[in-house]
Image (tube, rainbow, N blue to C red):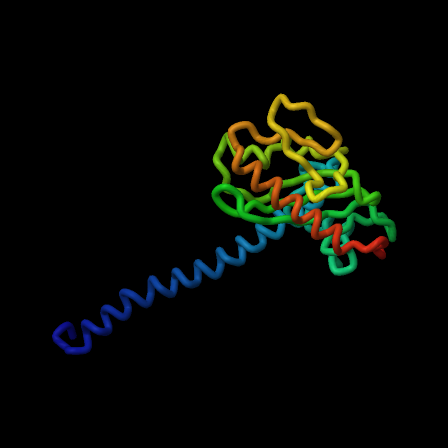
Amino acid sequence: MKDKAWYPVLFMFLVTAIPTALLIGLSQYTRARIQANTQISFEKAVLYAVAPDTPPSLRGMALHQRFLAVINTNIGAAAGAYRLMDGTTVKAYAIPFAGKGFWDTIKGVIAIAPDKTTVVGFQIYEQSETPGLGAEISQPWFGKQFQGKTLASGAAAIIFRRKGDPLGPHDVEAVTGGTQTSVRLERLLNKAVATWRAALNETIAP
């Protein structure tokens, strides 16, 4: 059979087709897993931003079910924000933001109280910044700074200050050694807040 003219063609076809089929199948499987994990990461960020006291043990399907139970995902009715609900009452707004960091995309959520001024929480759920430097934006100490802060009325609702500088009601401490990450995060965060504010009007139906 090896002497047949078609044998080399068939052999090369099988050598390439089988691994290719396996790779395509693996890619489809992992893509679905990646998408599911990304969605769970986003839902976790929303929950922990609007309700920082959410049990840390909440994971997987339990977290997803909690998200569906308490979060109103009709963002068109809330100027692009997700809403933590208690019956028909809005308890907090969750504003997603995303943009270019120093190295790659940064994605996060900032949560605002019903007064539309007080910050409830802050979470980063995707970043590829430098470990130990810019990547500190995803650490609990950094996010906790935002709780209780108030949004300034100007274009810069939240202001990043250098370590050691006095902090006012609108200020948080930037990451030491992560200047470029902090600058970019401050910019994209304030852009998201400004966009949300511009779309608010005076009243949002729950």
Could you tell whether 119 is left or right of 59 in the image? right
Could one spot residue 76 in this view of the protein? yes
- Closer to the camera in the image, 149 or 47: 149
- Closer to the camera in the image, 119 or 156: 156
Residue at the extreme bottom of the image, as rendered: 5
Residue at the extreme left of the image, as rendered: 3
Which quadrant is the C terminus positioned in? bottom right
Which quadrant is the N terminus positioned in? bottom left
The picture places residue 173, in percent across and down from the top left corner, at: 63, 29
Residue 7: name its quadrant: bottom left
Could you tell whether 118 is left or right of 127 in the image? right
Could you tell whether 19 is left or right of 148 in the image? left
- Closer to the camera in the image, 116 or 85: 116
Residue 182: name its quadrant: top right
Residue at the extreme right of the image, as rendered: 88
Q: Relative to 164, is 129 above or below?
A: below
Could one spot residue 62 in this view of the protein? no
- Closer to the camera in the image, 65 or 121: 121
Residue at the extreme front of the image, as rendered: 154
Could you tell whether 144 is left or right of 134 in the image? right
Q: Kindly identify the residue that appears in the image at 69 percent across and 46 percent down.
A: 46
Figure disc tally? 0
The picture places residue 105, in percent across and down from the top left corner, at: 53, 47
Q: Kindly identify the residue that appears in the image at 32 percent across and 67 percent down.
A: 17
Q: Kindly identify the residue that appears in the image at 68 percent across and 41 percent down.
A: 156
